[in-house]
Image (cartoon, helix red, strand yellow):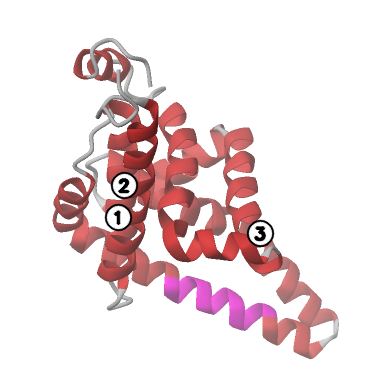
Amino acid sequence: MGIFSIDSPLMRALNFVANLVILHFVWLLYSLPIVTIGASTTALYYSCMKLIRTDENYVYKNFRKSFKENLKQSTIIWMGILVIGFVFFTDIRYGLFLNNTIGRIMVIGCSVFLIPFILISLYIFPVQAKFENKIFENLKLALFMSLRHFVMSLILLIIVGSIIFLGLFFQPFMGVLIICGAGVTAYLTSNVFIMIFRKYVPNEIEEDLAKTGNRFY
């Protein structure tokens, strides 16, 4: 096998990097209207999970397919997240501004409800990409999974937090984020989501093995 053969480790690595770069810029492009960030994030996770599970290289095709199918529901979910997030931000900021007993109660109360909000926000778009349910059903599923697999949820938060931290305080990593940040983040977290989702789709491993010629992903 030559070094430039399509199945060589070098070419597979280059193809992998190219897919992450493509997904990053496609996500940015489809997120430009801002209101479509939810749909583009759902499509990003759909494409990444397909890439990991079956080694499919049709990342843009898969992205467009998922974007169209989930545009309405994911946009509604995204707008809801924005509104609720703004309410939390405003209440916490106002509570800190008051700097009294009422203010502390407001901050503590918001912080308690902020935890499930963050967990749902972390899970909802991968869940939306994977399961064809109504919005409320997927929101319940996202919360249920995030609490049931709390260790996995912590791992996901560590991954996302580490990427943000490195981007802010390690300048060379900022270059990586500019070139393929969305692709890298979705790829790393998608590996965790696949492990979680397979507990709810027991036949998926066999189906993936059949598609990939018995290679395990």
Picture quadrant of residue 70: bottom left
Picture quadrant of residue 82: bottom left
> Mark 2 and 1 residues: CB-CB less than 8 Å, in contact?
yes
In the rendered structure, which amino acid carries the disc numbered 3? Answer: Leu
State which tag comes first along the sequence, 2 or 3.
2
The crowding category of the residue bearing disc 1, from other C-alpha atoms within 10 Å (few below 14, some 14 to 19, many at least 20), is some
**Numbered tag placed on residue 166 in the rendering:** 3
Q: Which residue position is annotated with label 2?
A: 19
In the rendered structure, which amino acid carries the disc numbered 1? Answer: Ile
The crowding category of the residue bearing disc 3, from other C-alpha atoms within 10 Å (few below 14, some 14 to 19, many at least 20), is some
* In this rendering, position of residue 164 left or right of residue 3: right
Q: In the picture, which quadrant includes the C terminus?
A: top left
Q: Which residue position is annotated with label 1?
A: 22
> Mark 1 and 3 residues: CB-CB less than 8 Å, in contact?
no
Residue at x 31% of width, y 47% of height? 19
Secondary structure of residue under mark 2: helix
Asked if residue 86 is among those painted magenta in the image, a careful observer would answer yes
Residue at x 23% of width, y 17% of height? 207
Where is residue 87 drawn, in percent x and y? 53, 78
Q: CA distance from mark 1 to mark 3?
A: 22 Å
Asked whether the viewer can see residue 57, the reply is: yes
**Numbered tag placed on residue 70 in the rendering:** none
Q: Please determine whether, in this image, residue 4 is positioned above or below residue 120.
A: above
Secondary structure of residue under mark 1: helix
Q: Which residue appears farthest toward the right when viewing the image?
A: 100
The crowding category of the residue bearing disc 2, from other C-alpha atoms within 10 Å (few below 14, some 14 to 19, many at least 20), is many
State which tag comes first along the sequence, 1 or 3.
1
Q: Which residues are magenta?
A: 82-92
* In this rendering, position of residue 58 left or right of residue 75: left
